[in-house]
C-alpha cells in the first residue's frame, strides 16, 4: 500500500529539488565565467609578452644585442643652422653625463628595474649612478636634469624619454635627492628593457 503524501511534504520535496537544480545552474554558470576569465588572462599575458619581445630582424642589423646600448640608435640629418632634426644639436654640443650624479628611479610595478638600468649605465661608463624607487608610477620614461644641455647623451638609451629641466622632491622617492644632477624615471614604456 502506497502512502499518501501530505501537501506540505510534496511542497518541501519539490522545493528542495528546485534548490538543487538552481544551485547546479549557478555552479555551471560560475564555472563558465571562471574558464572565460582564465582564457582571457592567458590571451592578455600572451599579448603583453608579444609587445615586449624584440624583433629579431633589428638585432641582426645591429649585431650583438648589447651593442644596442652603445649605439646612437638611428641617423639624424643636419639642418642649415647645424642642429639636427632630433633637436639635440650635433655631437659637439652634447655634454657627457658620465661623471654626473644620476639616480635611476623605478616608476613601474617591475621589481628590480632601476637596478638593472643602473648596472647597464655603469657598464657603459657612467660612474655615479644609483637606483631607487619612485612613489608614483609613470607610463613613459622621463629624464629630469639640473640644467639645460645635460642628459642628452642618455637619450640613446631611452630614445622615447621626455628630457626636461627639473628635479624630484624627497616626498616623491626613497632616494637621497641631495646633489643629484640627473633623475631618470623609468616608466612602463622602458620596462621591457
Image (cartoon, rainbow, N blue to C red):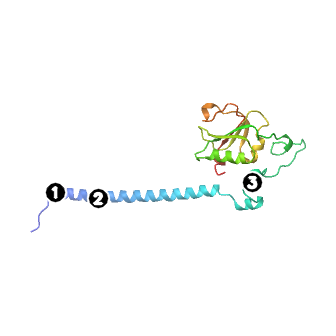
Image quadrant where residue 30 sits: bottom left
Q: Is residue 90 visible?
A: no
Residue 15 percent coordinates (x, y): 24, 56
Mark 3 — residue? 68
Q: Residues within 10 Å of mark 1 (few under 14, many from 20)?
A: few
Q: Residue furthest bottom?
A: 1
Q: Which mark is residue 7?
A: 1
Q: Tell me which residue sits at (69%, 33%) in the image.
A: 167
Per the rendering, the mark at residue 20 is 2
Q: Which mark is residue 93?
A: none
Q: Nearer the viewer, mark 2 or mark 3?
A: 3
* 49 is higher (above) or lower (below) than 184: below
Could you say where residue 165 lies in the image, as x and y percent from the top left?
A: 73, 34
Marks 1 and 3, how far apart in space?
83 Å
Q: Is residue 120 left or right of residue 134?
A: right
Q: Residues within 10 Å of mark 3 (few under 14, many from 20)?
A: some
From the top left corner, tell me how far across and down residue 42 is, in percent: 53, 58
Classify 60 as above or below 90: below
Q: Is residue 188 above or below residue 38?
A: above
- Of discs 1 and 3, which sits in the foreground? 3
Amino acid at each position: 500500500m502506497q502512502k499518501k503524501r501530505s501537501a506540505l511534504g510534496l511542497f518541501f520535496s519539490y522545493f528542495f529539488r528546485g534548490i538543487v537544480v538552481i544551485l547546479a545552474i549557478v555552479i555551471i554558470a560560475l564555472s563558465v565565467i571562471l574558464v572565460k576569465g582564465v582564457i582571457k588572462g592567458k590571451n592578455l599575458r600572451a599579448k603583453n609578452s608579444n609587445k615586449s619581445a624584440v624583433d629579431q630582424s633589428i638585432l641582426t642589423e645591429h649585431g650583438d644585442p648589447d651593442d644596442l646600448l652603445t649605439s646612437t640608435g638611428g641617423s639624424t640629418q643636419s639642418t642649415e643652422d647645424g642642429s639636427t632634426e632630433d633637436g639635440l644639436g650635433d655631437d659637439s654640443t652634447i655634454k657627457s653625463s658620465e661623471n654626473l650624479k644620476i639616480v635611476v628611479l623605478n616608476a613601474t610595478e617591475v621589481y628590480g628595474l632601476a637596478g638593472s638600468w643602473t648596472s647597464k649605465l655603469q657598464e657603459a661608463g657612467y660612474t655615479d649612478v644609483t637606483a631607487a624607487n619612485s612613489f608614483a608610477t609613470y607610463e613613459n620614461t622621463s629624464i629630469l636634469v639640473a640644467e639645460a644641455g645635460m642628459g642628452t647623451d642618455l637619450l640613446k638609451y631611452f630614445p622615447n624619454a621626455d628630457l626636461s629641466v627639473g628635479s624630484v622632491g624627497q616626498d616623491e622617492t626613497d632616494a637621497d635627492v641631495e646633489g643629484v644632477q640627473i633623475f631618470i624615471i623609468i616608466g612602463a614604456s622602458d620596462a621591457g628593457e
